[in-house]
Image (tube, rainbow, N blue to C red):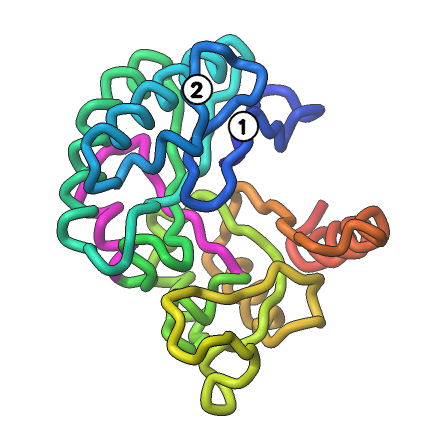
Amino acid sequence: MTARNTHDPRYAKLAIGVCPDQWGVWFPEDEKQMDPRRSSTWSSTDETERQAQLRNWRRLLELADQLDVREITSEFSGNPNTPRECEAQWYRSIEALTPGFEAYGIRLNMEAHPYDFVELHDEAYGLIRGVNLDWISYEFCCPHAFHLSDGVGDVERMIRSSAPMLREVHVADALNHRANDGNRYIVNPPGADVRVHQHAEIGRGEVPFDRVFSTLREIGFDGVVSVCVFGWHEIADEVNRRMLARIQDELGA
């Protein structure tokens, strides 16, 4: 989860939370929040877990307002093995949190993450359209492009189809987990219920970035673009500088 202060350019990308996958919103120094290892996701089929996460979300909104952060990006979470049940829980959570988001005037951008209850672009964007709240928008995550399309990688279609509600784009590269009979990655034991992907520097994977950037230019995208390269700590500064230069070259300063 990341949150941004959209009024101060010095804090164009201000992270105010720590959100390991499937753990939910968590502020380690905040005594008012439950440890995320005991509070799962806002789409959990366990009602105790869902209520704990709602308490965390309400605290997040308080802190975001104090920091003058007006835009938050998050994930659907849940479990792909119980999609209908998790979808219902997510709708219940959105309904419960709507008064807080609207009172604080904070926007929410949603992305489908691998192993969420919804993992495909079309289904995820359909949920955003269906909830029909003007403060909820869509985020397209480039390193999830192959999970969002079940290996097709049709980034132009996905970006164009979501253009009316596209607010943010995450930029990093990944291999196509469906390519070569699924052998881009090897998981043991075979058939394990996991999702594997990377967040690598542009050029280290197979996301067609020439088509990503050209499509963003075609639709006149003017939202948030964020770099999300993980796992290269020893060269992080170099990678981020190269990524920034590429984005500025493709989309303007």
Q: What amino acid is at disc 1? A: Gly
Image check: 69 left or right of 159?
right
- Asked if the stretch drawn in magenta spans residue 219, the answer is no
Q: Identify the image quadrant of residue 49.
A: top left
Q: In this view, does 71 lie above or below 103?
A: below
Q: Identify the image quadrant of residue 43.
A: top left
Work out whether residue 72 or residue 180 is closer to the camera in this orientation and state it.
180
Residue at 43% across / 19% down in the picture? 60
The residue where tag 2 is placed is: 60
Work out whether residue 37 or residue 21 is closer to the camera in this orientation and state it.
37
Q: Is residue 176 above or below residue 209?
A: below
Q: Could you say whether the residue bearing mark 2 is in a helix, strand or loop?
A: helix
Residue at 33% across / 27% down in the picture? 53
Q: In this view, does 130 lie above or below 63?
A: below
Q: What amino acid is at disc 2? A: Leu
Image check: 123 left or right of 1?
left
Rate crowding at label 1 as few (under 14), some (14 to 19) or many (20 or more) other CA atoms within 10 Å.
some
Residue at 41% across / 35% down in the picture? 24
The residue where tag 1 is placed is: 17
In the image, residue 19 lies at what x, y percent? Answer: 50, 36
Q: Identify the image quadrant of residue 135.
A: top left
